[in-house]
Image (cartoon, rainbow, N blue to C red):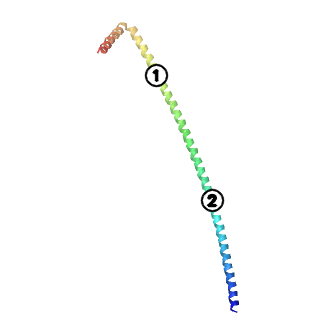
């Protein structure tokens, strides 16, 4: 009888342990499914985050390109303005040169002896400076 008492108790203990083990395995399976779901959710978030970063990088690149084009256009406009101003200054100098030449020729025609005297004085002065 003692054997039978312990054997039935052993069976119920084994069945209880088996049920407990079954419950633990089910909980482990549920945890694995939840971890897999969480990992998928994190992967999706990382993918969408990377996509957002790519969009921002593209937008920044487009802005930088646009700013570079604007800067280039402004620089080209400034260079054109500087060239035009330089041409205006050159034209003004050429006109002054021609006007000075005309006045000098007119002065020589109107006062030939005075011009000859000024030239002679300038020659003597230059010769005196060069001797020293």
In which image quadrant can residue 117 be found? top left
Q: Nearer the viewer, residue 61 or 73?
A: 61
Mark 2, other Cα within 10 Å: few <14 / some 14–19 / many ≥20 = few
In the image, taking residue 35 as reference, residue 100 lies left or right, namely left
Q: Nearer the viewer, residue 83 or 48?
A: 48
Percent of width and height locating residue 17 = 66, 80
The quarter of the displayed image where residue 101 is located: top left
Tell me residue 94's x, y (percent): 46, 19
Question: At which x and y percent is residue 72?
Answer: 54, 36
Residue 131 in picture, x, y percent from top left: 30, 13
Mark 1: secondary structure? helix
User: Residue furthest toward the front?
Assistant: 3
Residue picked out by circle 2: 43
Residue, x 68% and y 79% (percent of image)?
18
Residue that mark 1 sits on:
92
Label 2: which secondary element: helix
Give the image quarter of residue 50.
Answer: bottom right
Mark 2 / mark 1, whichever is N-terminal: 2
């Amino acid at each position: 009888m003692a054997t039978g008492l312990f054997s039935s108790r052993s069976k119920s203990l084994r069945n209880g342990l088996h049920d407990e083990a079954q419950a633990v395995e089910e909980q482990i399976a549920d945890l694995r499914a939840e971890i897999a779901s969480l990992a998928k959710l994190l992967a999706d978030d990382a993918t969408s985050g990377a996509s957002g970063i790519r969009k921002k990088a593209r937008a920044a690149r487009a802005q930088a390109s646009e700013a570079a084009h604007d800067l280039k256009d402004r620089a080209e406009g400034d260079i054109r303005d500087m060239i035009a101003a330089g041409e205006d200054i050159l034209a003004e100098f050429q006109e002054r040169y021609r006007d000075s030449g005309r006045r000098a020729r007119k002065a020589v025609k109107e006062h030939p002896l005075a011009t000859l005297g000024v030239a002679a004085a300038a020659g003597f002065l230059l010769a005196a400076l060069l001797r020293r």
